[in-house]
Image: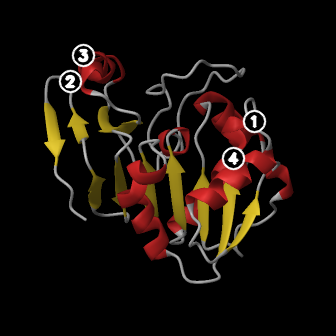
């Protein structure tokens, strides 16, 4: 399992996280890019233009997935990039295509998954840590649980601390908050901190985590 959780930054903000993603990929690897969480704002072509601009040195074969039902197998891909956007619509589309099971199997076989913002939230315990509006008909908020008993809080700022404390008490899960300059890497056993301003919240405690890579 090779999971990367991005805090939702772009360009220079996500350099530390992006560096790890690039280091895990072999040259000419096949990458699946999933931008569907932004469907309500941008076209697939605009999303792909952003992705290529974000990773100009990425020497891979990138497939854009605008319709998950058309992706029959993940066996040919080395890495998957799940972009940000609306967390609720993202999880709904993944579930409706039975793509959640494919992602879980891919991760457990050692596949690389990078989740940015909404894409990071859906890899953990619950998506209720998202501050997005539920613009879908989704009413089951359990995420893929590749990171169990912990929810992800991207775009983290210190003024959100009280709200995060209240969330941990209400939902009885811990929170890993990730600023736009931060990220996480989880290999199935060890969680490594990337970039700056990443914290672990319990109901009455906050631990500021120092970068480990």
Q: Position of residue 213 (x, y in %)?
A: 25, 65
Residue position marked by numbered label 2 in the rendering? 203
Could you say whether the residue bearing mark 2 is in a helix, strand or loop? Answer: loop
Distance of label 2 from label 1 (alpha carbons): 35 Å
Could you say whether the residue bearing mark 3 is in a helix, strand or loop? Answer: helix
* Left or right position of 39 against 178: right
The tag on residue 35 is 4
Verify CB contact (< 8 Å) between mark 4 and mark 1. Answer: yes
Residue position marked by numbered label 3 in the rendering? 162
Q: Which of marks 3 and 1 precedes in the sequence? A: 1
Vertical order, 172 against 209 (above or below): above
Nearer mark to the viewer, of 2 and 4: 4
Verify CB contact (< 8 Å) between mark 2 and mark 1. Answer: no
Verify CB contact (< 8 Å) between mark 4 and mark 3. Answer: no
Q: Which of marks 2 and 3 precedes in the sequence? A: 3
The tag on residue 39 is 1
Nearer mark to the viewer, of 4 and 3: 4
Distance of label 2 from label 4 (alpha carbons): 33 Å
Q: Position of residue 78 (x, y in %)?
A: 61, 74
- Is residue 102 visible in the rendered structure shown here? no
Q: Which of marks 3 and 4 precedes in the sequence? A: 4
The residue carrying pointer 3 sits among few (fewer than 14), some (14 to 19) or many (20 or more) residues within 10 Å by Cα, namely few
The residue carrying pointer 1 sits among few (fewer than 14), some (14 to 19) or many (20 or more) residues within 10 Å by Cα, namely some
| Residue located 31% across and 16% down the image | 163
* Left or right position of 160 against 50: left
Could you say whether the residue bearing mark 4 is in a helix, strand or loop? Answer: loop
Nearer mark to the viewer, of 2 and 1: 1
Q: Which of marks 1 and 2 precedes in the sequence? A: 1
| Residue located 67% across and 37% down the image | 37
Q: Where is residue 50 in the image (x, y as percent from the top left)?
A: 65, 51
């Amino acid at each position: 399992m090779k999971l990367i959780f991005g805090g939702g930054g772009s360009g220079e903000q996500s350099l530390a996280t992006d560096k790890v993603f690039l280091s895990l990929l072999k040259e000419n690897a096949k990458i699946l890019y999933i931008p569907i969480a932004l469907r309500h704002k941008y076209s697939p072509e605009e999303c792909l233009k952003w992705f290529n601009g974000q990773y100009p040195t990425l020497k891979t074969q990138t497939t854009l997935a605008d319709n998950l039902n058309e992706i029959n197998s993940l066996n040919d891909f080395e890495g998957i990039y799940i972009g940000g956007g609306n967390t609720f619509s993202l999880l709904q589309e993944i579930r409706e295509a039975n793509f959640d099971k494919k992602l879980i199997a891919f991760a457990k076989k050692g596949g690389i998954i990078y989740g940015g913002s909404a894409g990071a939230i859906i890899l953990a315990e619950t998506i209720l840590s998202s501050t997005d509006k539920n613009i879908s008909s989704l009413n089951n908020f359990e995420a893929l649980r590749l990171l169990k008993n912990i929810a992800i809080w991207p775009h983290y700022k210190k003024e959100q601390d009280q709200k995060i404390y209240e969330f941990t008490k209400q939902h009885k899960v811990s929170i890993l908050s990730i600023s736009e300059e931060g990220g996480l890497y989880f290999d199935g056993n060890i969680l490594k901190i990337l970039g700056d301003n990443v914290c672990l919240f319990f109901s009455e405690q906050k631990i500021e985590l120092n970068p480990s890579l």
